[in-house]
Amino acid sequence: MLTDPQDHLAHQFPLEGELRPTFSGLSDFLHRVEDMIVKELAKNAKSHAFDGFDVNWEDQNETVSCKHRLQHLVAQEKGLHVTSISWSCTGSVIACAFGRVDDGDWSAEKSCVCTWNLDRRGLNPKRPNTVIDVARPVMSLSFHPTSPSLIAGGLYSGEVVVWDTNRTQDPVLAQTGMSTDAHREPVYQVAWVPGQRRGEMLVLSAGSGGRVLLWTVDGGSLVLSAGYALVRQQVPHNSSLSKGRGSSNVGVTSLALSPWDSDTFLVGSEGGLVLKCSFSAQELAAAPPDGESVALRAPAQFSFSPRGGPVHSLHYSPFHRNLFVSVGTDGLARLHSLLQPDPLLSLRVSDSYLFGVRWSPTRPLVFAAATGQGLVQIFDLGRKSLRPAATMDQLTSGQPAYCMEFNPCQTDLLAVGNADGSVNIWHLSTELTEQGHRETAQLEQLANEVAE
Amino acid sequence: QAEVEETLKRIQTHKGVIGTIVVNAEGIPIRTTLDNSTTVQYAGLLHQLTMKARSTVRDIDPQNDLTFLRIRSKKHEIMVAPDKEYMLIVIQNPSE
């Protein structure tokens, strides 16, 4: 990996080499202050004066509590599940997508996308502020990173839609429709990625057809800008996987964008593969052309050791560029380094499936996992014990918790979307959200360990 | 010139020191061991704070003057040695 130029130490500012200007009196000044500074540095290194001294700037929150339990009765009556949730960039609005995650043909099921503004007075948890009716189940949702009214969604039918919640008449701003470019299978992940031009944002969609597509908003349509196809034969280091029968497409069940490197992304598949991919990959995909307007490329560059079932969720660490965590149907949370195929750590979270995983945005060693039993387990890798630091029961009578997102502004709020159609907003305790003394260093240590 | 570099090196290699910056009277950094953007941030903010600290001391007692400024935070300690023409900023992680 290339080193980041920002990490360059001992940079002489502003000029290097012999052309450094001489500052009169600088030598004398340093001579005057050196002894004093060195004395203080030495005293500080040995001092215990501040040991255990903590200042409470914020109100201490001792407990984890459920602040709101949001429900849309119409959707619940139809037995719809919350498939995806997203916070607006301002952190005030939570949107949730309704669909079905269990087996069956839900292609004709009508569903909706609901939003609640949690900061507005008179919030009614049983009455969403906005209800957008959608003709088909919505499987994934993502708010635009800077425009608080735009939401992208991926549907069961393979369509990708962008809604504008400011529009009163027809909230659909742009959609792919059923064009030849569109996905033919459910779209499990949508996200916004920066485009080539300044301020431009593209919609990324990925689905079980093995396609990762990038769309630009053009008038009322989403136009295909670039595309990638994941084909089993082109997965690197694939010798250990059986070349079984059936489709050679690698169905995408989860995708994670890197906050550190805009060219890299991770893909988790139905078959348990975890792949590191690149947007700038040039190799053409070995998928038979299907009338697409853009040549599809093969993005996979590296395979991590595969899992025993679909990979439901992946998340890059916000504190370490080489770390990510993945969860799937095997009930394990696996901590990986981008630099090696085997995981650094495998944590048994649950006997049931795991549907979501998210790193804490404020505590480098903490992550949350959503289980098929309706629990969210929070783990603190700084603790000696591998038992969860907190367990949050979603009160779904045992039905799964499917998705979780931390509020981007009020980082102690965690939203959880469940199979019983409810979205719970949890307020985490200070212990789970306030960064500890040497956490980043501990995480660094963890990342540098080599797996056995 | 070599003396300047040696002195700064001695300070920088002291236990726990994360960064060393020398700032001129206008608050412009003239020597640093940190990257550009971090340096500019520290220099600007601490120059302002040091001037405020100095005026606080002199307002209370015009015969007094600021000699040293220390800011203790959760993660580290920032030390500022002020002077007429320059200011030395040292950031230390004391518990390393």
Image (cartoon, grey):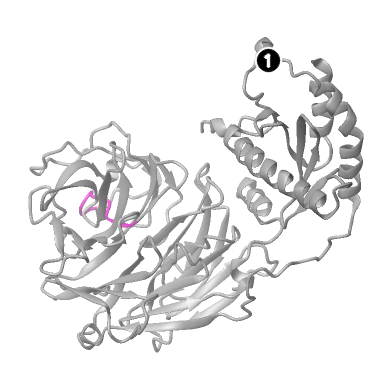
Question: Which x, y percent locates residue A139?
Answer: 25, 66
Question: Which x, y percent locates residue A314?
Answer: 42, 57
Residue numbers of the magenta segment: A245-254
Question: Which x, y percent locates residue A61?
Answer: 61, 78
Residue that lies at the very extreme toward the front in this rendered image: B62
Q: Is residue A250 magenta?
A: yes
Question: Which x, y percent locates residue B50?
Answer: 73, 44
Q: Is residue A438 visible?
A: yes
Label tally: 1
Front residue (pair A199, B45): B45
Front residue (pair A317, A61): A61
Secondary structure of residue under mark 1: loop
Q: Is residue A234 magenta?
A: no
Q: Is residue A73 left or right of residue A374?
A: left
- Quickly name the residue at label 1: A20
Q: Is residue A152 left or right of residue A242?
A: left
Point 37% across, 60% down: residue: A89
Front residue (pair A245, A389): A389
Amino acid bearing label 1:
Arg
Check the picture and name the quadrant holding the N terminus of chain B.
top right
